[in-house]
Image (tube, rainbow, N blue to C red):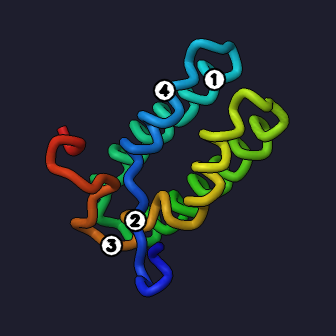
Amino acid sequence: VYSYLKIIQRCLPHLIREVDAFKSSENGKELSEEIHVIFKELKESLKSENMDERKSTKIAFEKRMEEIVKCHDPYGELRKPVEYTRNGLGSWFTCSFYPGMEPTKTWQNRQ
């Protein structure tokens, strides 16, 4: 869908809504909590103007997201949110490289 774009920032609140739909299982609850923690930490990290710090934080977030996918991939009940997460790898934290870019698509999600 986005193959014509060079810079993509996936909307993290959309991911949060996707994983929150699976909180009824213990594994889904754990996945949801992990994604919520990352989003909170990302919003805090975006306050930094130090680009070296932001780049290293992006790398760390990407590794954590890959680990989350790897950890939750075996759980069949989480196939949909894990695949959604996997499909966005490399694009969940683009905003770290671009000051002023938000990790969300809509104004309502920025609150």
Query: CB atoms at circles 4 and 2 under 8 Å apart?
Result: no
Q: Residue at x 43, y 67 (%)?
A: 94
**Is residue 22 left or right of 42 when viewed as pictured?**
right
Q: Nearer the viewer, mark 3 or mark 1?
A: 1
Q: Say few, some or many: other residues with alpha carbon within 10 Å of mark 4 (under 14 / 14 to 19 / 20 or more).
A: some
Secondary structure state at the residue bearing disc 3: loop
Find residue 58 and report its horizontal and vertical position in percent.
52, 61
Could you tell me the amino acid type at mark 4? Asp
Sequence order check: which comes first, mark 3 or mark 2? 2
Q: Which residue is mark 1?
A: 28
Find residue 50 and report its horizontal and vertical position in percent.
35, 66
Sequence order check: which comes first, mark 4 or mark 3? 4
Query: CB atoms at circles 3 and 2 under 8 Å apart?
Result: yes
Q: Which residue is mark 4?
A: 20
Sequence order check: which comes first, mark 3 or mark 1? 1
Secondary structure state at the residue bearing disc 2: loop
Sequence order check: which comes first, mark 4 or mark 1? 4
Find residue 111 and report its horizontal and vertical position in percent.
18, 37
Q: Which mark is residue 7?
A: none
**Is residue 9 left or right of 79 when viewed as pictured?**
left
Could you tell me the amino acid type at mark 1? Gly
| CA distance separating discs 2 and 1 | 24 Å
Q: Nearer the viewer, mark 3 or mark 2?
A: 2
Q: Which mark is residue 98?
A: 3
Secondary structure state at the residue bearing disc 1: helix
| CA distance separating discs 3 and 1 | 31 Å
**Is residue 55 left or right of 84 when viewed as pictured?**
left
| CA distance separating discs 4 and 1 | 8 Å
Q: Which residue is mark 2?
A: 9
